[in-house]
Image (cartoon, rainbow, N blue to C red):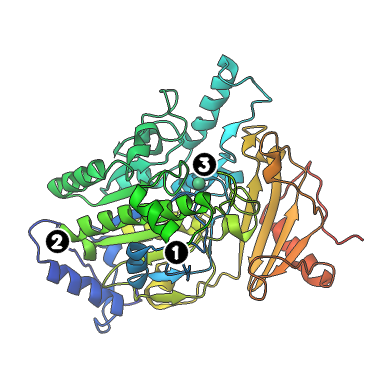
Amino acid sequence: MSKPGSTVIVRPLPHRGISRQTLRNLWLAIGLGIVGCLSLTASAEADSPPNIVLILSDDQSWTDYGFMGHDQIETPNLDRLAANSAVFKRGYVPTALCRPSLATLATGLYAHQHKISGNDPSPTTAKKNSPEYKELQAQLISQIDRQPTLPKLLAKKGYLSHQSGKWWEGSFQRGGFTHGMTRGFPERGGRHGDDGLKIGREGMKPVFDFVDHSIEEEKPFFLWYAPFLPHTPHNPPARLYEKYKAKGVESDFVARYYANCEWFDETCGQLIDFIDERGLTNSTVYYYISDNGWIQSTDTKKYALRSKQSPYEGGTRQPTMISWQGVIEPGERTDIVSSIDFVPTMLGVAGAEIPTSLPGINLIPVARDGQPTGREIIFGEGCAHDIADIEDPSKSLLYRWCIRGDWKLLLTYDGAVNRYNSSHPRTERRPQLFNLKNDPHENKNLAKANPDLVAELVQEISEWYPVSGRKVLTKWED
Ligand SMILES: [Ca+2]
């Protein structure tokens, strides 16, 4: 946002008692750069940076939205958000599993860095519910204490922050939230959210009360809105289930999942409308993503292969939206982005320093007006649901992948799986190379025909970070 030259310090007025139109015009002026030759360090110097709302879906495939072209699932509220957003249809999460994916959003780090690489300590290392196992659970949560999480960093800029929905790292305070719903491990039901999981499914009051509290306190706020939706249980209101049956969805399991997607969308609409009714739309930045994919099995409650937990697109691809009315020009962006960008982007929004140790980038310039990101490649990794060694994620390493342009290379490792073996058949141990433009569902492995490209991308993955002690095939072998 800033250019060389004389600096004008822009100080948006406190939230209460200002004209919304004034604020809107101010951000509009900043966004469009129509303030002549004067430079602006708007958020960096602002007394009151914008509010931040993370809307985090849980277990939803990249295809399953109206704005992504689904022909049956209705998501009118997220479609409305998309119409007001920079939409990155080629967004990704680096891991396709709830807990590591959420930890990445909280820390801005990859799983091998924050070390919360799976959902649970492996029950093969200590019997579940034994004192030894509880000790491992506590050890895993303690990883979050070592990280300067986004709520902690935003607190330094005067933000209040609220956790609702999914949260695995103990109580909300452990993540640095000032307010929240989850009591967390070792409390009963504290594995992944306890009371937090009521949000959306049982109303929005805790979030709305927190927003009003922040207005009262005249402080900017950060909302972690991560409802347990469309995640199982797929128990939607009957009106929604019947709607999808009436549309001709044959499988009851699929109809329930589709209905849960719309149920989730309804709660997003309630949140967006509430913020608008409070006059905060133009002083609020929205970031939208899902933590991992889900492809509903047609004849069981479970997910199909190549979705949740998987390094294929059905697990990792996630449309990503950033909305900041008056600043960000809505429209599609073709850049490939990753959820590792969430933390640096929001630190930039808040005018906070972005630690150079973070692997992601601030997406506001590309979101605002399409400036190139300068990044040509993104990376991801998949570790087992059950963590074999809390201090050494490589013991559970199953996959690493990268995407450069239209090409994706996927490498398969021999880390310990423990439970969920059926989610990781690993029937192809050789490199897998896909052209995502021609083959978005990764049906045709082109590795054999393109050895040079495979070697180049293997080199990129090796340089991302070294792995030792794991077997991996990096060349095609007949
Ligand atoms: Ca999930």
Q: Residues within 10 Å of mark 1 (few under 14, many from 20)?
A: many
Q: Is residue 112 above or below residue 373?
A: above
**Amino acid type of the residue that numbered disc 2 sits on in the rendered structure:** Leu
Of discs 1 and 2, which sits in the foreground? 1
Q: Name the one closer to the observer, 464 or 432.
A: 432
* Circle 1: element type: loop
Q: Label 3 to label 1, Cα distance in Å?
A: 23 Å
| Up/down of 388 relative to 73, above or below | above
Mark 2 or 3: the one toward you: 3
Label 2 sits on residue: 13
- Looking at the picture, tell me which residue is in the foreground, 115 or 191: 191
In the rendered image, the residue lying farthest to the left is 17
Circle 2 sits in a helix, a strand or a loop, which is it? loop
Which comes before the other along the chain, label 3 or label 1?
1
The residue sitting at the right extreme is 478
Q: Residue 104 at what x, y percent from top left?
A: 50, 48
What residue did someone put label 3 on?
Answer: 99
Q: Residue at x 41, y 35 (%)?
A: 193
| Residue type, label 1 | Tyr
Query: What amino acid type should be assigned to the residue bearing mark 3?
Result: Arg
Dot 1 corresponds to which residue?
65
- Residue 181 position by quadrant: top left
Q: Position of residue 4 (x, y in %)?
A: 35, 76
Compared to residue 473, the image places residue 186 above or below, namely above
Cβ atoms at labels 2 and 3 below 8 Å apart: no
Residue shown at the point (48%, 64%) measured from the top left? 319
Quadrant housing the N terminus: bottom left
Describe the element under mark 3 as helix, strand or loop. helix
